[in-house]
Amino acid sequence: MQRLTALFAPIAAAMLAVAILLPEPAMADVYELRTYTTNEGKLDNLNARFRDHTVRLFKKHGMESVGYWVPADEPNSKNTLIYVIKHKSRDAAKESWKAFLADPDWQKVAKESQVDGRILAKAPESVYMDETDYTPKFTSGKAGSNAAFELRIYRCHPGKLANLDARFRDHTIRIFKRHGMESVAYWHPADKPGSEDTLIYILRHESREAAKQSWDAFRQDPEWQKVAKESQRDGQFLRERPESVYMTATDYSAIQ
């Protein structure tokens, strides 16, 4: 027994040293997709509050604004704001939100902006997300363009998310680009069950009409048809039709 202890002691010490050097899982960047639904006639008030105050206060408390959009189609175009922010970690997100909500400046803004009635119709929806390893570098367009952004959500059959990721990594993004569709970012929800079966991503099109033409060309592309068929010989990836929301960037969004 003493000989075994002496044998394994150096190994245990080495493993401990490696464990100490490894980064904490909680320290990885995390993104947050948030959706706000306003009471009737209050979307302009919400946008004004973000433009004049909220974005600045987010930055003050360590939250990086990625992009802000309003759905392009009614009824959501009249009452919904969708945005993505970035945190240094999940723990940092918790601390940032705590500090933000306790900030006297925010409390004053929140109160004064709602003297004529509450802005939000319900509590914000939030999804924490991890960026995929195949998210490309995105260069924003010019402000004031007619760009149409598209938020897409794919939900997979059990065990098929890795296959879907491989197809995007090896083929889909490249074929998107061929047909004028620019990839903004790709994420997985950080928490189960979404982390095991869901892909969330955003595309940028030159316009809504360009989006239609691009999707038509993409679906008819012989390479895509071959890839789609060969990648699913062992079964379909998606358990339901993709969810798609066309969006317009707000005038205060960093991404245009």
Image (tube, rainbow, N blue to C red):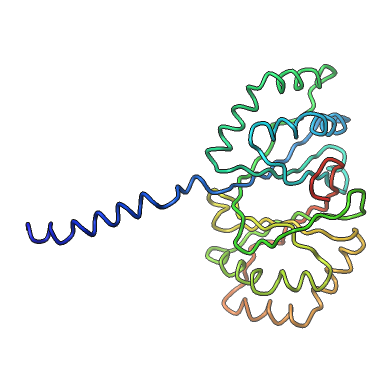
Question: Could you say which quadrant of the image residue 128 lies in?
Answer: top right
- Up-down: is 218 above or below 182? below
4 vs 232, nearest the viewer:
4
179 relative position to 152: left or right: right
| Residue at point 68%, 74% (across, down) | 171
The answer to whether residue 43 is left or right of residue 169 is right
Q: Which residue appears at 28% of the width and 57% of the height? A: 14
State which quadrant residue 93 falls in.
top right
State the quadrant of the N terminus. bottom left
The percent coordinates of residue 206 (x first, y second) are 89, 60
10 left or right of 41 in image: left
**Which residue occupies 75% across, 22% down?**
110
User: Where 256 falls versus 155 (above or below)?
Assistant: above
Q: Residue at x 85, y 55 (%)?
A: 141
Q: Find residue 64 and report its horizontal and vertical position in percent.
A: 68, 41
Looking at the image, the residue that sits furthest to the left is 2
Report x, y in % for residue 27.
51, 45
| Residue 15, image x, y percentages | 30, 56
User: Does 121 appear above or below 176?
Assistant: above
